[in-house]
Amino acid sequence: MFWKFDLHTTSHIDQLLDREDVTLRELMEEDDVLQECKAQNRRLLLFLSQDHCMQELVRLITTEPPADLEERSRFKFPNIACELLTSDVSIINDKLGADDSLLEVLYHFLEQDPPLNPLLASFFSKTIGNLIARKTEQVITFLKKKEGFIGLVLKHIDASAMMDLLLRLISCVEPAPLRQEVLHWLNEEKLVQRLTELIHTGKDEERQSNASQTLCDIIRLSRDQANQMQENMEADPLLAVLESQESVAGLLKNMFEGERSEASIVNGTQVLLTLLETRRSGLEGLMDLYSQGYERSYTVSSSILNAIEPHIKDFQQLLLDPPKKSAILTTVGVLEQPLGNARLHVARLVAALLQTNALSICQELCNLSTMDLLLDLFFKYSWNNFLHFQVELCVAAILNHPSSEEWLKQLDVLNLLYYLFQKCQLVQRILDAWEENDKIQGEGGTRRGNMGHLTRIANMVVQNLEKGPVQSQITDLIKELPEDCRGRWESFVDETLRETNRRNTVELVSTHNMHSSSEDDDMESPFPNDLSLQQAFSDYQIQQMTANFVDQFGFNDEEFSERLTDLFPMSCCKERIRQFDDAEEEEDIWEEKEMNYATQAKSRTR
């Protein structure tokens, strides 16, 4: 066997280190230098940890390479230097974290005029971030002595690497008491207020976007860690500031002060949406929007809602008069006045506000006829499925309110339902849009892009007529429709909608072993409903993915295995899988055996 032979070869790096005049650059030219470093090659580590080598490595990641170098090799050595410095080898971490002169060279990188080279900024952020995690006390002590540190980071916030650095300060510091100390330091530096000030019409879009994303990540990180915290632990000061009425009011003031810009509206609204989250983004967190009686894991603070309420009229005005956008060419023709990201985010905000069940908020939305306006946009922009889904969420929020007596005392559900069915004329709009689409298709035209969502809204109304928290109220409202409209609706439900649902049903497996469709009425699907799946996709399109998105998306292994078993029972298998018998004599795979190649060749030709 191969281990019977001595195949050991001396590493070329070891051969280089045998020379007294070997240079750092020569070693960095070797393809396996990083592998040898992580493999704890002692001779290599002793060489790299020399003062002059460490200074050269730090200089490489903080100094712009000569512009006359070939582009593909220009950042070769800075990249290798960063990988060596962040290889998580204790001797290098100790040397870098304990030497103030090296930390000063790193810190000097922030003192440059913007914009920073994005690659060098990422090398700097990765190196400092590694030190924050591994040499926490030394690095935090060093940074706290620098009075202008937070200001310099925010000056370069247009580089996403600086955003990552701030988040490492918040999430990577251990133990808990030291982390709390860092949070208080960041709060004393007014980090939240300074980030909020960047979301303003006068700031460039990249800075606004990164400031907004940083605030959103701080909210989510702080809430995650608060859920894991022991009861006697002190509250997160950054989260307390972010959720305060004063802070939210300041953000809204920046969004609507002076000339409105789409960037400030969108980025500010993303922060508000994060504050209004009752669960983390992801499939599991979205199902509670539609699950009746589902207990939320987080309650939205009244201070957030109190700050938003006076500005609902400003968001309403955005729906009527959005920031100007040029006409765009789409696959279905020229769109003279695009919907725009600002109005889409307003629709998302309205859906989130309706989910809070706050009496004053819902009443204000009714008074301003916000839902009526969103339905107008739903039918006007018949190809914007992102908008269609948000309107569908709004309808779901109104129809799927919890039915407890305590909730009914808090909120006049009849006002919301009356507004939706009488003022917004939801049923009439569904019927008119359906008939118009049938006419267009009958003339050879294309089916409208909002018909799928319209089908789901119609089904939602029908389902809540049959059972649900507001079944009796909706039944009464349907009876109050004009006689001709009520007749059209009944005919639509019994014939058109039923046939549409039948066509939309796809049989995924053979039905010969399946139970009758009547048995499905009281059964719940083991998988998330379509609404949740689409929300997850919508969030993926509109928002950046969080670090633990994959962990949150879908089911855990046990749930997934159980549900696969439900879908594909063993009875459908033609053969049973033979279990491995541990009692059987284990075959020695290393035993030398005589191979009969003639027999093998014969078997292959069969």
Image (tube, rainbow, N blue to C red):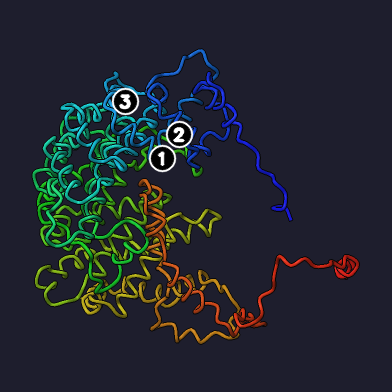
564 w.r.t. 153: above or below? below
- First in sequence: mark 2 vs mark 1: 2
Q: Is residue 55 left or right of residue 22?
A: left
Disc 2 + disc 3, Cβ < 8 Å: no
Where residue 18 sits: x, y (%)?
A: 56, 26
Amino acid at dot 2: Leu
Residue bearing mark 2:
45
Label 3 element class: helix
Label 1 element class: loop
Label 2 element class: helix
Determine the CA span between mark 2 and mark 3.
Answer: 17 Å
Residue 297 location, quadrant: bottom left
Residue 272: in sight, yes or no? yes
Quadrant of image for the C terminus: bottom right
In-front residue for pair 215/83: 83
415 w.r.t. 47: above or below? below
Residue 270: in sight, yes or no? no
Where residue 41 sits: x, y (%)?
A: 50, 38
Q: Residue at x 13, y 77 (%)?
A: 405
User: What mark, if any, has residue 340 been given in the picture?
Assistant: none
Determine the CA span between mark 2 and mark 1.
Answer: 9 Å
In-front residue for pair 354/82: 82
Where residue 49 sits: x, y (%)?
A: 40, 30
Circle 2 or circle 1, nearest the eye: 2
Where residue 254 sits: x, y (%)?
A: 16, 35
Disc 2 + disc 1, Cβ < 8 Å: yes
Circle 2 or circle 3, nearest the eye: 2
Q: Residue at x 35, y 43 (%)?
A: 339
Residue 467 location, quadrant: bottom left
Amino acid at dot 1: Val
- First in sequence: mark 3 vs mark 1: 1
Residue bearing mark 1:
89
